[in-house]
Image: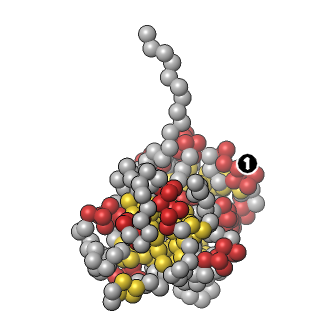
Amino acid sequence: MRTLELWRMYTREEVHDIFSPDTAFQPQGGSWGISGIVGIPNRAADWVFFVTFGSRQGTHDFNESITADGVLTWQSQPSQRLGDPQIRKFIEHDDRLNTSHLFLRSRWGRPYTYCGTLGYLSHDLDREAPVHFQWQLMDWPPSTETLEKLGVEMSPSTENRYLPTADRTGQLVKTERPVVSPPGGRGTGQFVARKQVAHPDQDARNSTLGLAGERLVLRHEVETLTRAGRPDLAERIVHMAVIEGDSAGYDVRSFEADGSPRFIEVKTTRGPASTAFFVSPNQVEFSSKHSGTYVLIRVFDYSDRNDSGRYYEVPGPLTDSFRLDTTEFRATPMGETA
């Protein structure tokens, strides 16, 4: 029996044999042989998505795409509506607890390429039958060779820019800490206009993005101190994440204009201010022990094109300003009880 391997090609029968080996496969019939969405046995909220770009069902043409950042725009079956139980499960999908696998092909008659798992981003609040979704491909991007084999033309990512279009390179613009709406659906205008990475796993895996945000903040700190008449302090700023890695508990050691220390943790996303992010126990502990001098700088709407973004600051312990959800556990065997 074949095993599941990222970016490998599979027939429907091979996918069936991986996820449902105890049932009989029906070519061109049954859920595994024909359906676009198949529930995995004994796993109530886990799914397999079979997607053929450019497909048609009855009079409905599916309009699906993937951006260069791995945001999949996808439509449900034409008969499904926002209140359908299956659709509600998709909307409530939590990729920390549930798994949805994507098998994709660019035209009929080809095997499917396994593109990894999906993370829910958003859905269109206004349109149904079908319902429109945006998902993050968690294992994106593939190699150039794989992209060529997929035969899928990438659509451009969109950015939510509030800055002037000119003279924006290298800018980091401060905003007030936004009132963040919970993640979820958007009206059609926003849904269509914004196809952007907004998933914390993608940001956490992207070390290049994290380093770019740290360097942007470091330059901003240098400029701020220099304008305040303290070039002597600007020269003493240290990029701790480069020198020491993650062990320090913060990324940049800077200063206030009066010379007091300023310990900065930087979290960067191309997505909006509402995008969640990961923090380590070490970072949480450091923020509590150095609450008077610690600040988290959240860089959002980051643009690779011109190395710019917006940011807000949150001083003090992370436990005072953010809901910290447990994402994994370290298990230690228990001792014997009497």
Classify 321 as above or below 132. Answer: above
Q: Name the residue type under label 1.
A: Glu
x and y percentages locating residue 153 in the rendered image: 58, 84
x and y percentages locating residue 31 in the rendered image: 37, 65
Classify 65 as above or below 138. Answer: below
Would you identify the image quadrant in which residue 168 lies? bottom right
The residue at the point 56 percent across, 46 percent down is 280
Q: Nearer the viewer, residue 138 or 63?
A: 63
x and y percentages locating residue 151 in the rendered image: 61, 81
Classify 293 as above or below 277. Answer: above
Q: Quadrant of the C terminus?
A: top left
Would you identify the image quadrant in which residue 299 lies? bottom right
x and y percentages locating residue 239 in the rendered image: 71, 56
Q: Quadrant of the N terminus?
A: bottom right
**Does dot 1 land on a helix, a strand or a loop?**
helix
Q: Nearer the viewer, residue 255 or 148?
A: 148
Q: Classify 10 Å Cα crowding around label 1: few (below 14), some (14-19), many (20 and above).
A: few
Name the outermost residue toward the top. 338
The residue at the point 60 percent across, 89 percent down is 166
Residue 93 relative to residue 70: left or right: left
The residue at the point 45 percent across, 77 percent down is 73
Residue 311 relative to residue 322: left or right: right
Residue 199 seen in render? no
Residue bearing mark 1 = 244
The residue at the point 46 percent across, 81 percent down is 64
Residue 286 relative to residue 175: left or right: right
Q: Coloring scheme of the render?
A: secondary structure
Q: Nearer the viewer, residue 160 or 262?
A: 160
Residue 279 seen in render? yes
